[in-house]
Every structure is written in structure tokens, then in C-alpha cells.
Image (tube, coloured by chain):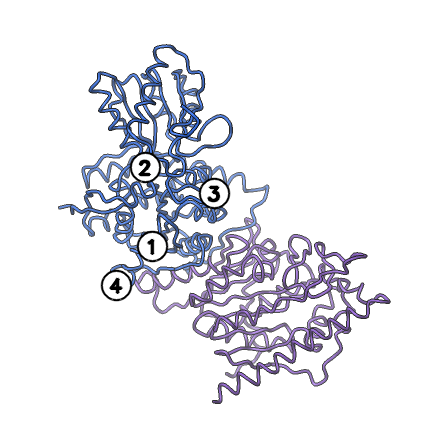
């Protein structure tokens, strides 16, 4: 479809207003604003939010930063809660209790704690049941709201408050879970991994597809955290860029089971470039710890190759 | 004309739900309430209701989906038992604090552990402070009638609280009894349309539900919940009066059975009241003035009214089908005795914890209770007010 992104950013009012209390340099608010900009101005949205940074910073009684309808009930159940709202919508539309010409879209936001970990059952259930809703995970790679504890999205070796880089154990000893692939394994019509990069184009286009594809859809969005990752707040977009250019955070989509990598760096940067500006990886650069960077690089390479293979295989299957 | 039927308690609950025709039912199977979502999904499959049935992956999600649906502006219902309710526990409190009039059919069963699938009231007692209205049902008829009355109570503007209708697992849920059903159109008219003032799907007035609510406001919000629970008393009686006009069946906060001239009485809830009445009849034939007070409305607790109803007795036994494990007595006992104390009703009162994990409670067991009360009246000696009934190693 033809659209002018600059025009959209300039002229579509943000559906998440300013005045919320998210930190400067946090990756979540720009991502959320951009996703909601992909909603047609005439459509109404019911936003569900898992407990987390975003919820406690955007809706502190009696103030809310949300211009659409919004519901937060608990930490682990944004998907189940929203599935109930979506079911009510269907029933009420069918029985003429709602205006038949008015469209409401259903979008859930959860951090990686509320999505990868405590909320994965609720998410899996809602997606399998086929509700017409989008679930967005803003992935900052740890439980930031409670003070930077490790999650299953925390990268290998990262220093967190429950996987501290100690003298015996050098940070989190496990690589991260691959949630987008888990969601793809639900055979959803649309799954994508994205980030605020390349002037938000990738994020905007994927958000629009996800919102307007009928059925359950999922977006995994990188949302760096200056407090947890230890970067300067003004460097948010640089961190996003390095995550993508090193292939730590590949941009891709899975449409009806077919993988498509949205961006292949012409020259894949070494992982050090991404790790170096972040305090959580500081110990990786101490003499004697070179093996940790090597191992990290190996894992990134392995997963990137796996993605390239998946793209090739699934496209072949599609052609056949 | 009402419809005469023979139904199990679960069938009766499912039929009440069918007649109510809610927008959303979200439920997860658990014995002994499993049949309710089973019967109900048949109604959905055959198009006899307009409901969206959400076959969730857990009870936590069942209550979460009900919260999402009710906030959205729909009527949401669910059914569960025991551990299912335990898994919902977090969301049970959130449902009432968001002031959502969700209606649940709770088929009472022992909460693990160890695992047991039979009836006691530990599930309902575990959420007695959660801000839900709790109605108890002696028979299948009462389980049905309470559900028909539920929305009128829960959705009243002065109430806006979720409500659970309790009945005894297996004892009534799986026993077939004669029942009088109300015609569909009469139920529809009685229950009425759900017209929430604010709801998520009202695009003309977007709302935000479920804030971070800190020191500045949470206390006031909790006070509003407490006020709503107090308001519910009046509404429960008004709805019962309307219901009586429609059906001829009379409901109050509790039922007094041969209590007027009684010397001794049992206070209990749910199906045990039937056994207590039978025991009472037997003793009356022997000239013993026995009575029963069956609590229907446990939350809100009709403290003053119960104290008054018990005020002329000489000895009272309160039966708890769940122990509070506080070393002092069950929940009903504590509520009844504190109500009596506040109303300055000083009567020897003892507590029996009974029927745990589905242990059968017979007329013989309750005869023993009345005999104990007769002894207390004679001697004035209570000895131990906190007793177990029908358990090995006691009595």
C-alpha cells in the first residue's frame, strides 16, 4: 500500500500521550506509539497491558496516557484478559449490541517477563484459540520493573540482579529463549520480529499487517532499557541499530508459516559492537573472558544461519 | 406455567445459564463442576444461546477472560471448583476490585491437598474476604433460583460486585432432583438487559480499567467496595421479593426451620441443611425442640439478623464444612459468634468441623450434635467449643 511515513508520524496524533512516566531513553514508548499509529484513525482500540514498567508508568490513578480503551488486570494474563474482551465484542456485535459499522481492534502489550515467562501459558492459549487480536511483546531482556532480574529473554552472560556477574558465575549462563519461533509454531497467520530501526519503517509496516491480519498475530519488538542495559539514554537508536546490524536481533516475519527476513545486513558487524556500549556486558571485556564473546558470537551466528535456512526451506515448501 | 423437570445440580446451573444467555462464558473443566461448561458448550454448538464460549487453558485465564469480557461491556459467567478457584484467586480479588458483576457457579469441593475431589467448603471459604457476594444453595432448585437472581443483585448500581452461587459437589451437583424451571421468556424479562455505565467497547467514551492505585486512592476504593457489600443486603432482599412474585418461592438471608420455639439449633449451609431438617423432624417427634438456621447469604454476612434469629435459643451448634486451621474454629462459627457478641446475645455456642473431603454426614451424626446441645443446656458446661464431627479418633 502507498503511504507516507513522515506524514503519518507528523499528522496522526499519538494514541499514547506524553506525560507518562517511562524513563528517558526507554525503547518501549516510541515502539508503542508507532504501533498504535498503524491503527486507522477511525478505528477504536482496546489495549490490554500486562503488569510491568509500561503499565505502572502510563496509568497511575487518576491519570492515564492512553487515549483508547485500556485494561490492565494482572501480570501473567494480558492475552487471556484481552481474549475475553474480544469474545464479548464478537457476541455483542452478533446480537446487535454494538454499532455494526464501528471497528474495534484488540492489542495487548507485555514485557518479556509478562510474555516469555509468567504469561506464556495465557499467551499460548489465547493464540491457539484464534482470537482476532495482536499481542506485542516489548522485549527489554529482563524484569526491569522490579529492578533488572533475569528473564528467559535475557541474553547469555548478561549481568542482572538475579544473574549477577560474580567471581564464580559470570552472569546469566543460558542463552535466550526464541519466542518469535515459539509463536510461529502456533501456526499463526502473522508473526514478526521487529525494532525501531530504519526510520520506523519496518516497525510500522509490520504493525499494520499484524493489526489488520484477521486472527491472532504476534510481534516481538526490541525495546532497549537504559537502566538495565547500561547505555546512555541518547543512544537508544544506536543500540537498536547495533542489535540489528550484528544480527543479534534479526528482523523477520512469518506469514502463514513462510519465513521472510526483512533485513540482511550487507556486512554483519561483530557482536562486540553491540555488547561494548552496554554495562551489563562489561565483564565480557575483561582479560581472560574472551571465550564469552566467542561463545556469544557463535550463538548469534548459529541462530542467524538457522533463520536463513528456515527462510529457504519454507519458501521452497510454499513454491511446491 | 413453570416447567417441572428432573435435573442434577450441574444441569440446573447450566440451564439457568442458558436462560440467562450471557455474552461470554469462559471456563476450564474441573470435577465436580465440569458438566456445567460441557452442557453449556452443547447449547453454544447447537445455537440455542448467543454466547461466545471461551475454552480457556486454565482457570486463571477463565477469570481473566471474564474480567476482559465484563469490562468490555458484556455479561460474563464461569463455573469452577476447588483448585480451579484457587488458581483464580488472584483474579477473584481483581474482579471485585474492578467492580465487575461477573457471576460464577461454584460447585464446592475440597481444596488440595492431598488431592480430593469431593465436597467441602474450603474453596468458598478461601475467598470469603475477596469481595464477592456468596450465595449458598441447599438443593438443585436453590442453585438454579440463586443463579436466576444473581445478575439482578450483582449488576445493581448500588452493588456492582461479582457473585458466586455455591452448591455442594456431587451431593447436589450430581444428584437428580425434581425441580421447577421458570419459562425462558420470564427469565429473560427478570434478568433484563445488561447496561453498564462505562465499558471498554464504548468507542464514544474510551475508558481505562485497572490502574496502579497507590496510597493516595486505594483506601477510598476499598471503602467503596465495603459500602457496596453493605448495600448488597438491601438489594438481595429486593430481588428475592421480585423473585417470589414471579415464582412463589421465598428467599431471605437465611432460612429458619422450626426455629421459632426451638431450644437448640444447628446453623449450617448448603445440602447439610436437608439432613439437619430431617434430623430436626425426627427429634421433634420425640418432643425435643430442635431447629435449623440455614445460611443462604454468607457474603455479605447478615450479622445482626442472624444474631436476632438465634437470640431465643438455649444452645447452638455451628457446622463448618471447612476448618480455618486457626486453632479456634471455622469461619461460619467465628462470624456467627461475633455477630452474637456484638448484638449482646449470650448463648452457649459450639462449633463442629464436619464433612471434610466428602466425609458423609448422616442423620445419626446430627442427632449426636443435638444430643450434645441438650447436654449443654442441662449442664451449662461446654468444655470444648471447637469440635470435629465424624472423624476417626474423636467422639
The image position of residue A65, as x and y in percent, is 56, 58
Q: Are marks 3 and 4 in contact (CB under 8 Å)?
A: no
Residue depth check, mark 3 versus mark 4: number of the one nearer the observer = 3
Write the residue at 46% across / 69% down.
A216
Give the residue pinned by disc 1: B37
Disc 2 from disc 3: Cα separation: 37 Å
Disc 4 from disc 2: Cα separation: 34 Å
Of mark 3 and mark 4, the one earlier in the sequence is 4
In the image, farthest residue toward the right: A287
Q: Are marks 4 and 2 in contact (CB under 8 Å)?
A: no
Tag 3, which chain?
B
On screen, residue B203 versus residue B15, left or right, reads right
Relative to residue B222, is residue A286 depicted above or below? below
Tag 4, which chain?
B
Disc 1 from disc 2: Cα separation: 27 Å
Relative to residue A300, is residue B1 depicted above or below? above
Q: Specify the quadrant of the image occupied by residue B309.
A: top left
The image position of residue A82, as x and y in percent, is 46, 60
Nearest to the observer: residue B236 or residue A166: A166
Disc 1 from disc 4: Cα separation: 14 Å
Nearest to the observer: residue B36 or residue B93: B36
Of mark 1 and mark 4, the one earlier in the sequence is 1
On screen, residue B274 versus residue B131, left or right, reads left
Give the residue pinned by disc 4: B46
Mark 3: give few (<14), some (14-19) or many (20+) Cα within 10 Å.
few
Of mark 3 and mark 1, the one earlier in the sequence is 1
Chain B palette colour: blue
Q: Say the numbered circle drawn on residue B114.
A: 3
Give the residue pinned by disc 2: B236
Q: Do the dots labelled 2 and 3 sit on one chain? A: yes
Amino acid at each position: 500500500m502507498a503511504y507516507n511515513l513522515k506524514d503519518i508520524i507528523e499528522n496522526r496524533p499519538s494514541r499514547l500521550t506524553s506525560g507518562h512516566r517511562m524513563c528517558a531513553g526507554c525503547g518501549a514508548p516510541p515502539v508503542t506509539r508507532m504501533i498504535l499509529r498503524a491503527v486507522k484513525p477511525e478505528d477504536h482500540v482496546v489495549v490490554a497491558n500486562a503488569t510491568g514498567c509500561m503499565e505502572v508508568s502510563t496509568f497511575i490513578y487518576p491519570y492515564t496516557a492512553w487515549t483508547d480503551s485500556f485494561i490492565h488486570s494482572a501480570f501473567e494474563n494480558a492475552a487471556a484478559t484481552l481474549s475475553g474482551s474480544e469474545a464479548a465484542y464478537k457476541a455483542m456485535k452478533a446480537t446487535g449490541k454494538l454499532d455494526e459499522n464501528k471497528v474495534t481492534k484488540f492489542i495487548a502489550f507485555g514485557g518479556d517477563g509478562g510474555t516469555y515467562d509468567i504469561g506464556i501459558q495465557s499467551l499460548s492459549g489465547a493464540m491457539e484459540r484464534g482470537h482476532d487480536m495482536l499481542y506485542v511483546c516489548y522485549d527489554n531482556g529482563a524484569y526491569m520493573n522490579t529492578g533488572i532480574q533475569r528473564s528467559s529473554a535475557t541474553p547469555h552472560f548478561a549481568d542482572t540482579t538475579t544473574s549477577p556477574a560474580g567471581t564464580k558465575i559470570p552472569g546469566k549462563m543460558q542463552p535466550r529463549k526464541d519466542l518469535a519461533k515459539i509463536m510461529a509454531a502456533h501456526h499463526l497467520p502473522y508473526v514478526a520480529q521487529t525494532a525501531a530501526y530504519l526510520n520506523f519503517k519496518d516497525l510500522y509496516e509490520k504493525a499494520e499487517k499484524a493489526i489488520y491480519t484477521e486472527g491472532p498475530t504476534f510481534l516481538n519488538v526490541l525495546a532497549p532499557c537504559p537502566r538495565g542495559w547500561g547505555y546512555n539514554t541518547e543512544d537508544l537508536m544506536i543500540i537498536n541499530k547495533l542489535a540489528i546490524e550484528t544480527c543479534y536481533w534479526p528482523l523477520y516475519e512469518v506469514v502463514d508459516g513462510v519465513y521472510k527476513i526483512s533485513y540482511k545486513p550487507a556486512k554483519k558487524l561483530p557482536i562486540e559492537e553491540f555488547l561494548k556500549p552496554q554495562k551489563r556486558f562489561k565483564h565480557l571485556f575483561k582479560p581472560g573472558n574472551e571465550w564469552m564473546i566467542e561463545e556469544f558470537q557463535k550463538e548469534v551466528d548459529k541462530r542467524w544461519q538457522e533463520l536463513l535456512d528456515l527462510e529457504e526451506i519454507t519458501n521452497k515448501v510454499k513454491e511446491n | 406455567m413453570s416447567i417441572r423437570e428432573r435435573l442434577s445440580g450441574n444441569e440446573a446451573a447450566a440451564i439457568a445459564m442458558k436462560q440467562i444467555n450471557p455474552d461470554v462464558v469462559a471456563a476450564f473443566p474441573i470435577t465436580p463442576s465440569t458438566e456445567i461448561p460441557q452442557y453449556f458448550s452443547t447449547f453454544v454448538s447447537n445455537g440455542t444461546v448467543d454466547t461466545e464460549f471461551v475454552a480457556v487453558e486454565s482457570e486463571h485465564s477463565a477469570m481473566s477472560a471474564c474480567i476482559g469480557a465484563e469490562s468490555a461491556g458484556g455479561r460474563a459467567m464461569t463455573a469452577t471448583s476447588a483448585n480451579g478457584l484457587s488458581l483464580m484467586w488472584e483474579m477473584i480479588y481483581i474482579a471485585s476490585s474492578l467492580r465487575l458483576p461477573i457471576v460464577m457457579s461454584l460447585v464446592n469441593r475440597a481444596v488440595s491437598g492431598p488431592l480430593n475431589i469431593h465436597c467441602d467448603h474450603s474453596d468458598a471459604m478461601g475467598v470469603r474476604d475477596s469481595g464477592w457476594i456468596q450465595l449458598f444453595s441447599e438443593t438443585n432448585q436453590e442453585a438454579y433460583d440463586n443463579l436466576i437472581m444473581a445478575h439482578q443483585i450483582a449488576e445493581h448500581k448500588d452493588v456492582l460486585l461479582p457473585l458466586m452461587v455455591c452448591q455442594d459437589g456431587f451431593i447436589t451437583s450430581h444428584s437428580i432432583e425434581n425441580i421447577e424451571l421458570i419459562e425462558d421468556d420470564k427469565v429473560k424479562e427478570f434478568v433484563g438487559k445488561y447496561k453498564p455505565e462505562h465499558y471498554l467497547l464504548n468507542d464514544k467514551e474510551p475508558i481505562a480499567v485497572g490502574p496502579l492505585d497507590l496510597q493516595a486512592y486505594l483506601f477510598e476504593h476499598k471503602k467503596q467496595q465495603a459500602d457496596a457489600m453493605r448495600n448488597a443486603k438491601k438489594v438481595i432482599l429486593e430481588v428475592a421479593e421480585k423473585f417470589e412474585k414471579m415464582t412463589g418461592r421465598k428467599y431471605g438471608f437465611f432460612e429458619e426451620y422450626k426455629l421459632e420455639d426451638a431450644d437448640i439449633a444447628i446453623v449450617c449451609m448448603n445440602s447439610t441443611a436437608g439432613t439437619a431438617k430431617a434430623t430436626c423432624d425426627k427429634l421433634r417427634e420425640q418432643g425435643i425442640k430442635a431447629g435449623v438456621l440455614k445460611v443462604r447469604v454468607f457474603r455479605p454476612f447478615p450479622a445482626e439478623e442472624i444474631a436476632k434469629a438465634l437470640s431465643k435459643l438455649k444452645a447452638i451448634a455451628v457446622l463448618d464444612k471447612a476448618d480455618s486451621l486457626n486453632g479456634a474454629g471455622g469461619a461460619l462459627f467465628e462470624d456467627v459468634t461475633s455477630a452474637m457478641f456484638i448484638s449482646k446475645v449470650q448463648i452457649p455456642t459450639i462449633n463442629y468441623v464436619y464433612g471434610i473431603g466428602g466425609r458423609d454426614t448422616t442423620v445419626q451424626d446430627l442427632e449426636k450434635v443435638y444430643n450434645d446441645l441438650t447436654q449443654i443446656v442441662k449442664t451449662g458446661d461446654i468444655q470444648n467449643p471447637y469440635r470435629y464431627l465424624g472423624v476417626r479418633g474423636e467422639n
